[in-house]
Amino acid sequence: MFHHALPNKTVIIGAGGHAKVIVDILRSDPHVELIGCIGRDPHANVLGLPVIGGDDILPELLEQGIHHAFVAIGDNAKRHALALHVENLGFELINAISPRAYLASHVTLGKGVAVMPGSVIEPDTRIGSYTIINTGATVDHDGNIGMACHIAPGCHLSGNVTVGDESFLGTGVSVIDGMHIGEGCIIGAGATVIRPIPSYSLAVGVPATVKRTLLINKERGGRHN
């Protein structure tokens, strides 16, 4: 006789627009049972999924046997810090992979990764933990995307592109093959990257030009403008 494993009871940490997309994706996953969202407004819901409390109830959820979570926060540095906190509490972070995304063979994913509908990830590409590959974004072969990055809708990264931890590539960014974008960068919407971008840079335009260096927030481990 075959025994089917019960779905993993999972809490969504976040209750905004990004959480809506994650809830929609995970509802199509038969291995996941969503039990609610963590947010500030206890009377709110996300696509009908209730907000069941704030961060303070997470230890209680663990005691109730809910061991899986997804951190659905848009800000890279905040998502990174919160994901580490949630893992330290004892939760296992799952991935949210749209059935309408295409992942080629030999793609390596970390934990807590979101891959949205219409996105394409080609062979021998590594996607770091807590990273978002958003709607319709493409990452070609041999890509190396760091932790807690956000590759926004409609971005196109050619082969052998490296993106450092916590970098944000705005909507419609294009990156030619072999480019290296450092950690903590912001690449403005519609920019075309044809030269390497140093860490903690704000770069905009066609071709992308560094406009200034972003300050590093030592306490949070991320950047601020």
Image (spheres, helix red, strand yellow):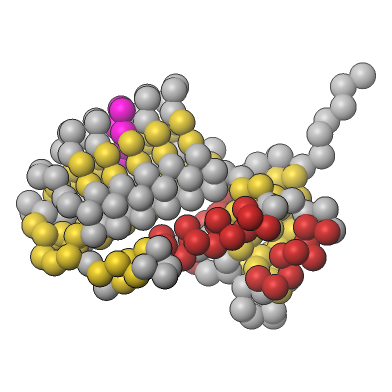
Q: Is residue 139 magenta?
A: yes
- What residue is drawn where x is 61% and y is 78%? 40
In this view, 162 is above or below 125: below
201 or 218: nearer the viewer? 218
- What residue is drawn where x is 58% and y is 69%? 15
Total numbered labels: 0
Q: Is residue 19 visible?
A: no
Residue 58 location, quadrant? bottom right
Q: Is residue 81 magenta?
A: no
- Percent across and percent down for residue 195 are 10, 45
Left or right, 118 with respect to 28, comes to left
Identity of the residue furthest to the top in this view: 1
In this view, 64 is above or below 134: below
Residue 38 location, quadrant? bottom right
In this view, 44 is above or below 213: below
- What residue is drawn where x is 54% and y is 62%? 82
71 or 96: nearer the viewer? 71
Quarter holding the C terminus is bottom left
Residue 188 location, quadrant? bottom left
- Percent across and percent down for residue 165 are 35, 50
- What residue is drawn where x is 37% and y is 44%? 146
Quarter holding the N terminus is top right
- Percent across and percent down for residue 185 are 25, 57
Tell me where the magenta segment starts and ends, as one range.
138-143
